[in-house]
Image (tube, rainbow, N blue to C red):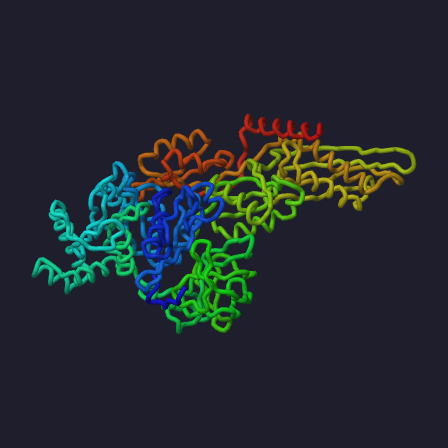
Amino acid sequence: MKEYTTEFIRNVALVSHGSGGKTMLAEAFLHAAGVTTRLGKIDEGTTVSDFEDEEIRRKLSLSTSVVPVEYKDHKINLLDTPGYTDFVGEVISALRVADGAVVLVDAVAGMEVGTEIAWSHCDVFKLPRFVVINKMDRDNADFKKALASVQEYSPVRLVPVQIPWGEKAAFKGVIDLVTMKAYANEGKTAEDIPADLKPAADEARTALMEAAAEGDDALMEKYFANSTLTNEELAKGLKAIVRSGAYIPVFAASGGHEKGILPLLDAILKLIPSPAEVPAAVAQGKGGEETLPASDAGPLALYVWKTTADPFVGKLTYFRIYSGTLQGDVRIWNQVKSAEERMAGLSIMRGKETMPVKTVHSGDIAIVAKLSATSTGDTLCDKGHPLTLPMPKYPNALFRVAIKPKTQADAAKISPTLTRLCEEDMTLSWYQEHATGQTILQGMGDQHIDVAIRRAEGKLQVGLMTAEPKVPYREGITRKADGNYRHKKQSGGSGQFGEVWLRIEPCPEMDFEFTDELVGMNLSKSYLPAIEKGIHATLQTGVMAGFPLSNVRVIVYDGKEHPVDSKPVAFEIAGREAFKLAVRDASPVLFEPIMNVRITVPDANMGDVMGDLNSRRGRVQGTESERGRTVVVAQVPLVEMLRYTTVIRSMTGGRGVFTMEFDRYEIVPNHLAQEIIAAHQKEQEARQEE
């Protein structure tokens, strides 16, 4: 692939709901531009974008792929993103390095939830965007209805730049309102507009001229004076309103059947800004913030937006250069990790195909293999001019599963494997749950976790299984109690003897306090560390249900020892058993984690969500309204929220989202506590039988 300098590059993210036609539109762009010789098919697993085994198996995109299209001496870096909600992290990463977005809308379904989510992230990054009403040749396709569904959602006005030439099975191509020409099929040749469509085209062009005139005062005056604009003036005004975000242009296409493709590529070149035309990136430098216009002459600044594990090549690092230029085989500084990396073997990626390059210019997207310390979100720069580019905010992962190794050999690899997966995907995270002893993996939903597990098996050769995560309950006491225990063991030779008398009481100010009130010579203080050790072991495993016990004070006030048989191990056992007896008399209770939850849902679903929260022992704290949506603030026990991601999606058609954070522990109602204790006892009995 030849080198492209900044002004000849376009970085464009393709976003939509799942099955909106992004992958096939990318295929159509490649084929129409002459990059490929045949159109790939999703069903056959032959598309450039969806090349991973799991994507071919599921017939949907699971990660963002880079598809550069060379067209009219420009390079358009298409970022084909997944549409399924679970993989929103991939969409955010792609939009972080894009300079514009093409939002695909199904001509039958109209605006769908995945499109709404992608749209809101485009708003966060302030990206100029196109709306493409796609699949115009489907049965029941309706351009006006689909357009109205988007306009209803968008506060920014939409203005058609094309109207469809026919609809459904009669969809032939598009009518361009700037050139006032018709383009059949992929759009290679311009034709006169058919007579029956001329009135509609004239009316739509007038609306487009009015919108374009708003982008420039001189154009506005000219339009008021003459009631018309030349094609060049219209194109100039259109460019201004798209880049300012005042209007969103609308196009028509059928990616899968290559209709309306070349006019859309032309529009991307004319209307989407090059990296040199977007606002300069802002990075944190030694002396504070620095602005970095996209220029080969600027200080080197690369943002790593994606990393993947390749079983053959090793780790692949995807980056965009925001400033400066990069040659192959240089040493570069990772400012986030404070580590030096060697950039050997720069390449441009097209799907799974790598094309080596010698130089990467400012604004371009490329990859490098085998970086050791670098992960997603890092900034690479010159060591003498350190810079840090900001990382986008990713949604919190709320779907949790417990992870177990398939074999003993896999057990040792769990930690590095999960760390690697989470480095690749910023919406995955993992931690060890001390209270339950489980390894917890968190993601955006069940599909997200399933894909991560399969990736671990396929790419990292580690077998993992999932299980329902246990709730990290805690045990506690509610009143004072005494306990005593004598441990006596005689089996020939020296025996074991130890007797401990102790008192326990609630201690809300700290997890555990151990003290004594020993007087006289019944028990030597030298045995107190052994007694404390025995109690500590019990605190970890609890007394009733196998959960850690906390907020307790232990006072040892008496005991007995034997001049020959007393040993630390005897007092360790005696202390442990005396403590257990005391806990059973101290009105023990189970505590459960209570979460602060914020649920954002369409107004129409608020009643269902409130009713459901009540059934989950939730306490609604209040509601807030924001543009057709209601935010419900509530406190809910964690055990009731374990599969809430799936519930809220099905209840709201995928439009509901929630965030959740720990607030405090509260006593579990007695009838539920008894069930948890009974389940624990059953588990213990089953283990003993094994």
At x 15%, y 56%, the residue is 209
Q: Residue furthest left?
A: 225
Residue 554 appears in the figure? yes
Q: Is residue 599 left or right of residue 416?
A: left
Above-or-below relation of 302 to 83: below
Quadrant of residue 362 within the rendered picture: bottom left
Above-or-below relation of 76 to 521: below
Residue 662 appears in the figure? no
Q: Where is residue 197 drawn, in percent x and y?
A: 14, 46
In the rendered image, the quadrant that contains the C terminus is top right
In the rendered image, the quadrant that contains the N terminus is bottom left
Q: Nearer the viewer, residue 272 or 211?
A: 272
Q: Residue furthest right?
A: 493
Q: Where is residue 485 drawn, in percent x and y?
A: 77, 33
At x 57%, y 49%, the residue is 460
At x 16%, y 60%, the residue is 231
Q: Nearer the viewer, residue 562 or 662?
A: 662
Number of marks in the rendered image: 0
Quadrant of residue 326 within the rendered picture: bottom left
Q: Where is residue 542 drawn, in percent x and y?
A: 65, 36
Q: Where is residue 173 drawn, in percent x and y?
A: 23, 48
